[in-house]
Amino acid sequence: MQKIPITLAAPGMVLAKDVKNSDDPSSMTLCGKGVTLTESLIGRLRQKDIQSVTVEGHPVHEEGEATLEEMLAALDLRFSRVADDELMKKIKALYRDQIQRSMGETGGR
Amino acid sequence: MEDKRSEIRRLIRDIKSLPTLPGIIVKLGSLAENDKVSSQEMARVVSADQVLSAKVLRLVNSAFYGFPGRVSTVSNALILLGVNVVKSLAITSSIFEIMEKNVVGLWEHSMGVAVAANTLSKTLKLPDAEETATAALLHDIGKVIIKLKLQEDYDELTTIMREKECTMLEAERELLETDHAEIGGWLIQSWLLPEKLIEPVACHHQIEKSSVHQVKTAVVHIADALVKASGFGFSGDPFVPPIHPAAWKKLGLTEALLATVIEDLEGKLVEVKNFSLEIQSNDDPAT
């Protein structure tokens, strides 16, 4: 999944997370996950002053954006000094999963 | 002969009045010590300084504290966040004014760690999440001081890091006989901020040194590692510091809990980045 500014949201993208009225988890859900965005829906979210949405896959590619391989190599470098630490190995695995998900690599979609 | 550590400590004592630190901080400090002063009166002091209150509100309404766009007055900010947080924000916004332009990477790292500390505290249902986030915002303030006040040493640190391929922390300990955490602790102590903000700053690389505020210290320690793990911002070197098992245990963290924190945090870091870009573009025309 990928979090994108609302200005880059386009019809056909599928919400990967609920869109909430505010950051507060208990606040009202404006639009549930799994919903496919349409022109009018995006317009209404913008009217509600929603700044960003999280969508499935990795639909927006910014220029100069790192590839998955580059991101994983950078992760290796960042963890290179704690490579033998058991706890840090687990944390690195969590980050590797996170990177792969953000690039739309896993999740069977 | 004075050793390097004592020399730096003396230097910190003497720069109590950083050129950027407005007199209003001293005023707020004395007000905060007096229990009889209401938050209304304190709000008046902050509000009297237009620039300062604008900055405080900008920070309060950012992603740090979870009230985006909902705090419109200084008085509200004081009630929601407490005096210590508002006072620290006033200091932070003055200090970071230099950082925003000179060391954007460190500013982004510090904001990221503040958001991470807040997210961790809320997930673990710890008290005083806002104060912990504020300590996190200040945790690398020692690095700013090294860069601003010990410029020759700072250049040498860069050389040592390159030659020995070590972390900034290791280079600091070798060259300065102290490190940015201890220096930061001295500095904010000289600003009369409370112990609960000093300890997490001073001990964020040596949590075993923390005696009273171990939970807050553990949160900042882990938040720092998480932000470095995600590669957000730049704090001097790219290396993730090891998380002390005692900190992990102290907070009762599990992999599953951390996984939710990481996912939550990655989303928020996008907002921090936007906030940072927005600040930079807003500040440009003024210069």
Image: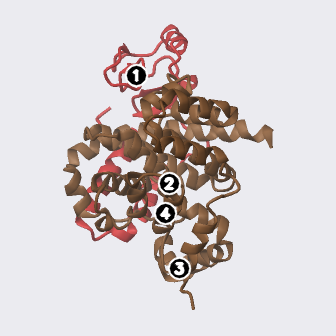
Chain colours: A red, B brown
Distance in Å between CA atoms under marks 3 and 1? 59 Å
Snapshot quadrant of residue A93: bottom left
Disc 2 crowd rating (10 Å Cα; few below 14, some 14-19, many 20+) is some
Cβ atoms under marks 3 and 2 closer than 8 Å: no
Circle 1 sits on which residue?
Answer: A14
| Rendered residue at 54%/55% (across/down) | B191
Q: Amino acid at mark 4?
A: Pro
- The chain letter under disc 3 is B
Disc 4 crowd rating (10 Å Cα; few below 14, some 14-19, many 20+) is many
Q: What is the quadrant of the N terminus of chain A in the image? A: top left
Snapshot quadrant of residue B205: bottom left
| Same chain shared by disc 3 and disc 4 | yes
Between residues A13 and B238, which one lies in front from this camera angle? B238
Disc sitting over residue B35 in the figure: none
Looking at the image, is B196 positioned above or below residue B82?
Answer: below
Q: Amino acid at mark 2?
A: Leu
Secondary structure under the numbered disc 3 in the rendered image:
helix
Q: What is the quadrant of the C terminus of chain A in the image? A: top left
**Front of the two marks 3 and 4:** 3
Disc sitting over residue B6 in the figure: 3
Cβ atoms under marks 3 and 1 closer than 8 Å: no
Percent x, y for residue A16?
36, 26
Circle 2 sits on which residue?
Answer: B192
- The chain letter under disc 4 is B
Disc sitting over residue B238 in the figure: 4
| Rendered residue at 62%/30% (across/down) | B47
